[in-house]
Image (cartoon, grey):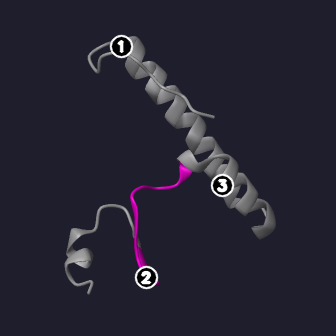
Amino acid sequence: MNIQIFGTKKCFDTKKAMLNLQCRDQDTLTLVQYLTDEDKDQKVLENQQILKTPIVRNGRKATIGYQPDIWKNWD
């Protein structure tokens, strides 16, 4: 699913739409926590928007979220 929202950040209806979509993502995240490991992988692949971003990878090392202090120490 590829949802785009066009509007201004000051528009109350735009804010409500964004909040509604974020809550739906949160419901999916809650569901994923209770699935078996095999089902989790499939559900995350179907709903990639629930992943926290950015995911930054350097070889076998990876971080989730904005982690500039860790990135400085990477070779």
**Residue denoted by label 2:** 59
Residue at (65% x, 45% y) in the render: 28
Is 25 rendered above or below residue 21? below
Residue 4 in percent (x, y) is at 48, 26
Q: CA distance from mark 1 to mark 3?
A: 30 Å
On screen, residue 75 versus residue 17, left or right, reads left
Instruction: Check disc 2 and give the amino acid type.
Output: Gly
- Residue 9: quadrant of the picture: top left
Q: Residues within 10 Å of mark 2 (few under 14, many from 20)?
A: few
On screen, residue 55 versus residue 41, left or right, reads left
Question: Secondary structure under badge 1?
Answer: helix
Q: CA distance from mark 2 to mark 3?
A: 22 Å
Answer with mark 2 or mark 3, whichever residue precedes in sequence.
Answer: 3
| Magenta-colored span | 50-62
Is 38 rendered above or below residue 52? below
Camera-nearest label, 1 or 2: 2
Tag count: 3
Examine the structure image and report whether residue 35 is included in the region drawn in magenta.
no
**Residue denoted by label 3:** 44
Residue at (46% x, 56% y) in the render: 52
